[in-house]
Image (cartoon, helix red, strand yellow):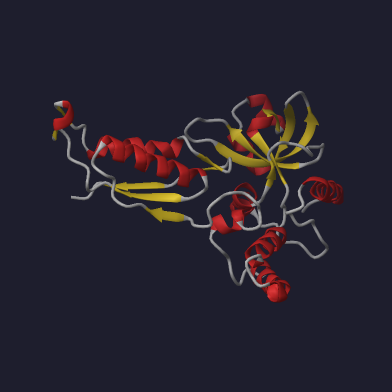
Amino acid sequence: MYNQQLIDNLNKAIESHFPLIAKVEEGMNTARKGVSRLVMLDRYSLKDTAKLTLTIGDLVVLTVKEDPKWPVRGMGYVKEILDHKAVIEVEEEYRGAIENPQEAESGLVTRDFNSFEKVLEIYYEQIAKRNARGLSEVEAPNVRADIQKAYEQELASSRFVPAGRVLYGAGSGAQVTFFNCYVMPFVPDSRGGIAEHRKHVMEIMSRGGGVGTNGSALRPKNAPAKGVNGRSSGSVSWLDDIAKLTHLVEQGGSRRGKNVCVPLR
């Protein structure tokens, strides 16, 4: 699927700048197809987000359609590097989302550096190696190498597939969560309590976790707020405010947070 020049350039970049990432080796061939490939590269593979090693021919994931609510992601190859921009040849299956008619016809789009990322892990086996090393770091030194090898075999063969947050985080050195989902305690029925809960939700989302919020303790709409001689806007309005954090917090540049808010009565 990938040409040797791309692999050689990628290995040079990894060797010089990204010591935590496994280089492409002979026998690595799990590249996935279709949506599975996009999800793997966009959500779980590590990237050169700073474009330190960006060069012609690199594989990138990019925002093909820059819609504020429903952006469309895709993949392509760098054809030309400009001043903080690059010309990218979008893979054919993602060209239908290109809005500019001329770009759609040619498949070549010009994107700001902030709209795409260079993929460093193009094969699933690279992710498996990183995960195995990261997960085995807690083991005793005398058994660590054997456990790392066993982890790698199970992961690379897909006999065991960790949660997405583990695939992304283990061995990456990033301060992210290994848990996909969190269930938060009920939201305290006060302005200070809501603000504190909101802060925790934002922190969890920024590190890649999804959040479940129990709003059953919040007073209903128009209930008295005695301290200010007013009335409450209601639990639904406050939970809607918390839910809107989902649209504000990026998780690794590619996915939004997951937030389930339930006002139980």
Image quarter of residue 189 = top left
Q: Residue at x 22, y 43 (%)?
A: 218
Left or right: residue 261 versus residue 230 is right
Q: Quadrant of residue 199?
A: top left
- Please indicate whether residue 213 sits to the left or right of residue 75 in the image: left
Q: In the rendered view, tell whether residue 23 sits above or below residue 63.
A: below
Residue 245 x, y percent position in the rendering = 42, 37
Q: Nearer the viewer, residue 128 or 80?
A: 128
- Where is residue 64? Give x, y as percent: 61, 35
Residue 20, horizontal then vertical, whole percent:
73, 54
Q: Residue at x 34, y 37 (%)?
A: 195
Name the side, left or right, on which 193 lies relative to 223. Answer: right
Q: Is residue 220 left or right of residue 49?
A: left
Residue 208 in the image: state x and y as whole percent: 51, 48
Total tally of numbered discs in the picture:
0
Q: Is residue 134 above or below residue 37?
A: below
Residue drawn at 61 percent across, 72 percent down? 159
Q: Is residue 165 above or below residue 87?
A: below
The one nearer the camera, 181 or 225, is: 225
- Residue at 62% across / 25% down in the picture? 100
